[in-house]
Structure formats: C-alpha cells, structure tokens
Image (spheres, grey):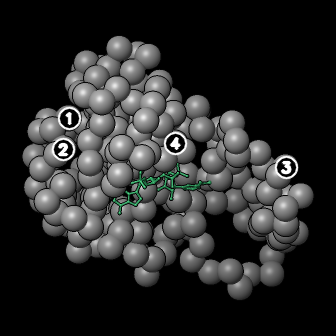
Amino acid sequence: MTRSPTSPLVVLGSGYTGLVLHGIGASQGRTVHATSRNPSNNLGGIPSEHRLRFDLEQSSTWQNIPTSADLIWCFPATPLEQVQAFARTLDAPARRIVVLGSTSAYEVSDHSTEYPPPWIDESAPIDLTKSRVQGEEYLRKEHGAIVLRVAGIYGSGRNPLDWITSSRVTASRKYVNLIHVEDLAAICLLAGRR
Ligand SMILES: NC(=O)c1ccc[n+]([C@@H]2O[C@H](COP(=O)([O-])OP(=O)(O)OC[C@H]3O[C@@H](n4cnc5c(N)ncnc54)[C@H](OP(=O)(O)O)[C@@H]3O)[C@@H](O)[C@H]2O)c1
C-alpha cells in the first residue's frame, strides 16, 4: 500500500541527515516536524510550529510526537528497553516508521584474511549482540518498521577527502561505502511512502 504523501511526518533526531530530510520533505509540500532534545538551540532554521522536543531517555517528551504521523528515526535506536517502551506508545502499524541503521550491523566477524573482502548484501548475517541492531530488529519485527542499513554519509560539510587528510580514515582492507545525504533523505521519504 502506498502511503499518502500528505501524511504528516516527524523526523526523530534532526542532526545532519534529519535537517536535510526536513528540508526535502517540506519542499514536497508535506507537513514535517523536526525533533531535538534542545529545540531552541538546535532547530533554529525550522519554523517554530514544526519544532518538537523529544528525548528517547525522557519519557515525558514522548507525548510531543503527534499521533498518526509517520516517523523517520535518525539516531541510534538504543537502548532496547527505552526503544521498546517508546514504541509501545505509538499506534503502529497505522503509521509508517523508517529507521536509519548502519552497515556496521554486518560486521559480524572481522577475522577473515580474505582479500578483497566478500561482497555484503541484505542477506548477510547481522550482529545481534550490538545494542542498536537489537533496537532496529525489535522495531522491524514488532512495529513493522523499515530499517535502512546506511553506509557512510557525505555531503555539504562532510567531505570524505577531509577524513583521509585528517587521518580519521586510514588504510584498511575494507571497501568504503558512501551515500550522499540528499540521496539518503530521498530514499527515506520514498521508503516511508511505499
Ligand atoms: N554519519 C554517518 O556516516 C552514518 C553512517 C551510517 C549510519 N549512520 C546513522 O544514520 C543516522 C543519521 O546519522 P547522522 O550523522 O545524520 O546523525 P546525527 O547528525 O548525529 O543526528 C542525530 C540527532 O539525533 C538526536 N539524538 C541523538 N540521541 C538522541 C536521543 N537519545 N533521543 C532523541 N534524539 C537524539 C541529536 O540531536 P539533538 O542533540 O538536537 O537532540 C542528533 O543530532 C544515525 O542513526 C547514524 O548512526 C550514520
């Protein structure tokens, strides 16, 4: 079923990706709310009527999420107990939930000496010992969430060449996978609709 593009949307955690998501969603005519643990400091560019205070660690803020809005979850879905408690307050599956995971979910074993390393796709095993993976799998299985396992995010202000010159990224046996933040935002919006 394709979800109406007019359903209100909440971007949970409006950091680098969340703010781009807000901009693209709003430019498509959707009502998009953005959350922050500190909206007055961090959501200055968002119209005040669309700013929400939300902190997964403070249950008193959970009621600020409008009922029936779709959600795009843009911070690590952890710890599991709080993810579960918050998700139970939502009326899913009436609403769509898209969760941004990480390709680190597939780092089950790093002991292989095989080179080049094997290709990994969605059928590869995931590391359920990782707290965020547990949160993502809970949301996927119990609340019908769509989990996107995201590669390194680049874009304006995040230039992979800077990561090399500053030695944040050093020589490695691994492949590097990257996605531009605007492509990621567009995919999140589409995933929430279809
Ligand atoms: N960056 C990458 O290369 C990369 C790669 C793979 C996957 N990912 C994943 O993709 C997602 C988006 O990445 P990003 O780099 O755009 O993230 P980001 O810039 O860190 O933004 C996430 C925002 O979520 C809010 N937040 C954090 N913890 C929270 C909590 N407990 N409760 C409520 N809000 C919270 C914070 O905003 P406030 O301080 O304003 O509340 C934070 O700025 C994340 O889940 C990240 O782990 C990122």
User: Is residue 131 toward the left or the right of residue 86 in the image?
Assistant: right
Asked whether disc 2 touches disc 1, contact meaning CB atoms under 8 Å apart, the reply is: yes
Label for residue 39?
Answer: none
Residue type (three-letter) at the residue carrying disc 2: Ile
Residue positioned 70% across, 41% down in the render: 157
Which disc number belongs to residue 69? 1
Front residue of 161/147: it is 161
Q: Which of 192/6 is in front?
A: 6
Q: Taking the image as drawn, is residue 9 in sight? A: yes
Q: Nearer the viewer, residue 164 or 42?
A: 42
Q: What crowding class fits label 3: few (fewer than 14 Cα within 10 Å), some (14-19), or many (20 or more)?
A: few
List the residue tagged with mark 3.
Answer: 161
Distance from disc 2 to disc 1, alpha carbons, whole Å, reads 8 Å
Q: Position of residue 27 (x, y in %)?
A: 44, 16
Q: Is residue 8 above or below residue 29?
A: below
Q: Which residue is identified by label 4?
A: 17
State the CA–CA distance, disc 4 to disc 2.
19 Å
Decide: is 158 above or below 105: above
- Sequence-wise, which precedes: disc 4 or disc 2? 4
* Beta carbon of the mark 4 residue lies under 8 A of ligand 1: yes
Residue bearing mark 2: 65
The amino acid marked with disc number 1 is Ala
